[in-house]
Image (tube, helix red, strand yellow):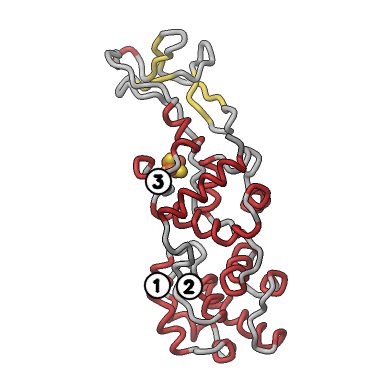
Amino acid sequence: MGRADRAEFLLEKLRERIDRPTTELEYETPYQLLVAVILSAQCTDDRVNEATPVLFEAYPTVGDLAEATPDDIYPFIQSITFPNNKSSYLAKMARQVVEKFDGRIPDTIDGLETLMGVGRKTARVVAQVAHDADALPVDTHVFRVANRIGLVTKGATTPKKVEQQLKRVIPKEDWGEAHHLLILHGRYTCTARSPDCHDCPLPEVCTHYDRLQNRPDPIDGLDASAGTYYCTTSEHYFDDPDTHVDRYDLEQVACPHCGSMQVVRTSTGQPTKQVKDYRVNG
Ligand code: SF4
């Protein structure tokens, strides 16, 4: 199945499961959305939603926030990741909006990207959610799910490349919806640490699932006292493995004698072969 067909199948299946493909950040105005998205960088939406009501009560408009110093803002967001940096971003961003945009949150990606604390992804999320702009922002969930399923090629190693490739296989009118469907699928089903493939509607088109199924079965009856590893190609035990980089750029345990990566751990009989899972750390 080609990538465009895979994308079409994915959208159809995820639409059936996800009723409201939209942001889980709570906001009422573009100002509140922008603040919430800045705060959500490397932080959960739940934690942001717990902090923002009190922050918005203290600073109801961007003009009010522009009067605040980072020290004023810090206590409201200290439960959020990187509160020092984010207090500073919010104070500077608000002043920029007042001074350069007459107190109105910019409604274009280019305008948003000029603001402090607003990078490529944040600008696109705000423009897409608040102004229905043609954008397909790629966050950690979209990046992981797109790679795992095989919506993008092996060369899509950055969020920008993933975004460009997704835009080629997903119709423009579906970009915004696809962004939210992929995020929610990644957040609740295809999670970073343990994707719930048994409760997923996509195994038949998912390349990650396919690779997991093709891992060798565990082997019984190995003699752990004969060596830490056993090479199933040349059928012998050893303790000090080599490493080889496979075609997915993953470093794999390899046999020091024949170079095979068909190596199992003798204590468990489990294959040492890893399947790339596109987890984004940090
Ligand atoms: S089959 Fe598994 S890895 Fe593939 S999309 Fe579903 S949960 Fe993710």
Sequence-wise, which precedes: disc 2 or disc 3? Answer: 2
Q: CA distance from mark 2 to mark 3?
A: 26 Å
Instruction: Name the element at disc 3.
Output: loop
Label 3 environment density (alpha carbons within 10 Å; few <14, some 14–19, many ≥20):
few
At 57% from the left and 46% from the top, the residue drawn is 7
Q: Amino acid at mark 3?
A: Arg
Q: Nearer the viewer, residue 187 or 99?
A: 187
Instruction: Name the element at disc 2.
Output: helix
Give the residue number, with chain letter if any, for mark 3: 193
Give the residue number, with chain letter if any, for mark 2: 83
Give the residue number, with chain letter if any, for mark 1: 79
At 61% from the left and 62% from the top, the residue drawn is 121
Q: Nearer the viewer, residue 71 or 3?
A: 3
Q: Position of residue 3 (x, y in %)?
A: 61, 40
| Image disc number at residue 200 | none
Above or below 112: residue 256 = above
